Image (spheres, rainbow, N blue to C red):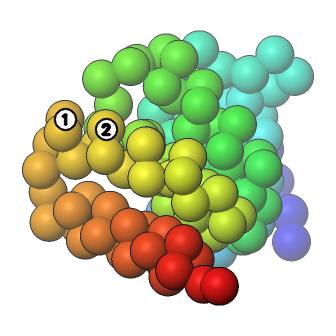
Amino acid sequence: MSSPRAHSSDPVAAFRRADSLLSRRRPLEALDALRAVLGPAGSPDASVHLLAGRAYLDSAQLRKAEESFLRVIEIDPADHYARFALGKTLQRQGRLGEAETSLKMASAMDPRPEYQEALGEVRARIAVVTDRP
């Protein structure tokens, strides 16, 4: 459901509203709020694309999530969280080899336990798929 505030002309307010909506598990409303910030050409700001990617992922729009996370990595190749989120997105699409690569990179950049855990999960799924007759 759209509200007048969702289409605020203030990009900072729109971003904050989208972030708040996403934290309350309302990804479609968050995307609606971000629409003004993203615009037809997209935002040059990695944080906007990262937030959009999270909202797309949370609403199971996996191709759009993938595009958003790839855009973040294009803008900021050192963004380990975008690589982690891309890995999780690829995993949900069943693209385990690509997910492993992305998660491996995220883990190498920042060895957070959740990155290591996600990488282990993907590797276990790959092993199961590989072991099938």
- Front position in the image: 71 or 115: 115
Residue 64: x and y, percent? 76, 47
Answer above or below: position of 21 versus 66: below
Name the amino acid, label 2: Met
Q: Tell me whether circle 2 and circle 1 mark residues in contact (CB < 8 Å).
A: yes
* Circle 1 crowding by C-alpha within 10 Å: few under 14, some 14–19, many from 20: some
- Front position in the image: 91 or 130: 130
Name the amino acid, label 1: Met
Residue, x 40% and y 18% (percent of image)?
A: 76
Residue, x 81% and y 16% (percent of image)?
A: 41
Is residue 67 at all visible to an observer of this figure? yes
Q: Is residue 91 found left or right of 27 in the rendered image?
A: left
- Residue 109, disc: 1
Q: CA distance from mark 2 to mark 1?
A: 6 Å
Q: Quadrant of residue 38?
A: top right
- Front position in the image: 14 or 124: 124
Residue 72: x and y, percent? 51, 28
Q: Which residue is mark 2?
A: 105
Q: Is residue 18 found left or right of 109 in the rendered image?
A: right
Q: Is residue 45 found left or right of 123 in the rendered image?
A: right
* Circle 2 crowding by C-alpha within 10 Å: few under 14, some 14–19, many from 20: some
Answer above or below: position of 99 versus 128: above
